[in-house]
Image (cartoon, rainbow, N blue to C red):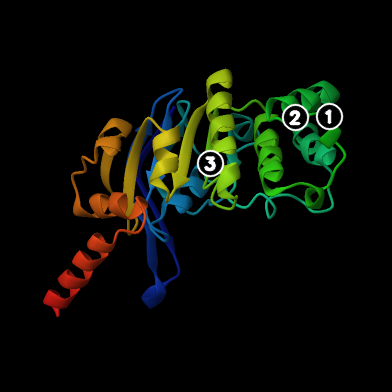
Amino acid sequence: MIEVRDLRISFGRGASLVHAVDGVSFTVQEGETFGLVGESGSGKSTVLRALCGLNPNWQGSVQIAGTPLAARPDKAFFRRVQMVFQDPYGSLHPRHTVNTTLSEPLAIHGIGDRDRRILDVLEQVGLGPAFRYRYPHQLSGGQRQRLAIARALILEPRVLLLDEPTSALDVSVQAEILNLLSDLRRAHGLTCMLVSHDLAVVAHMCDRLAVMMQGRIVEELDVAALAAGRTATDYAGELLAASRGYDRRLADSFIETDSSAC
């Protein structure tokens, strides 16, 4: 469903040139959920923004559902590919009601039967008709993210791109959103790409994942290997150890290593 070959994305010029994505390649099968993980600044969200058409300045080869991705995709592309952003408040227009937010993509693509579609998608994400005429400030963080998911689903896409979809939410709400996304993926046969720095989220959602560092993919592994702690690179191993939370013995070992290096 997704095939990326030698993707390169740079920002700036001359001495300030930054290679944010430097020769990334991977494939995602239809119906699969594929994760991109890495620390902040590793380039994972930049990859996602190129795939959803938000960043036209890239080099390489990208195909989605067998169709090459153009630098400026046509309207039909956005019916196939939709994205859920990290900040559920910043991605919503503060002066648009839930109804307006969900009506707009239908109007842009000339899709009829809007009342039924809006009510159906609200039901699917667990909001219901009572939320139809509320504004974003009248919703909790979890409800806003449910609305953002509903907006992505209302065009019935084949590919759903997820950029840290739970990182801005309370811990108590994160599991609800992850379970909702898993249920929706199965119900709609979606192919998903999930960007996250949280390996627990990736283990819950994904079939396979790639580890990024400084704009490159340094390792690919499946969730079984992740759960067993079987990593091929030191960086992936350190990322896995860090995701388990604070460990005094591990922290002391890092301090000792740094001291010996000095």
Instruction: Identify the residue at the far right of this view.
Output: 133
Instruction: Identify the residue at the far front of this view.
Output: 248
Q: Residue at x 21, y 43 (%)?
A: 231
The residue that label 3 is drawn on is 162
How far is disc 3 from disc 2 in space, using C-alphas?
Answer: 19 Å
Whether residue 5 is visible to the viewer of this picture, yes or no, is yes
Q: Is residue 2 left or right of residue 136?
A: left
Q: Is residue 49 left or right of residue 114?
A: left
Quarter of the C terminus within the rendering: bottom left
Quarter of the image for residue 199 reads top left
Mark nearest the camera among 3 and 2 is 2
* Badge 2 amino acid: Leu
Q: Secondary structure at mark 1?
A: helix
Q: Residue at x 80, y 33 (%)?
A: 107
Check if mark 2's residue and mark 1's residue have beta carbons within 8 Å.
yes
Q: Secondary structure at mark 3?
A: strand
- The tally of labels here is 3
The residue that label 2 is drawn on is 122
Q: Secondary structure at mark 2?
A: helix
How far is disc 1 from disc 3 in space, using C-alphas?
Answer: 25 Å
Mark nearest the camera among 1 and 3 is 1
Whether residue 61 is visible to the viewer of this picture, yes or no, is no
Check if mark 1's residue and mark 3's residue have beta carbons within 8 Å.
no
Picture coordinates of residue 158, whole percent (x, y):
56, 26
* Badge 3 amino acid: Leu
Crowd band around label 3 with a 10 angstrom C-alpha radius: few (<14), some (14–19), many (20+): many
The residue that label 1 is drawn on is 129
Crowd band around label 2 with a 10 angstrom C-alpha radius: few (<14), some (14–19), many (20+): many
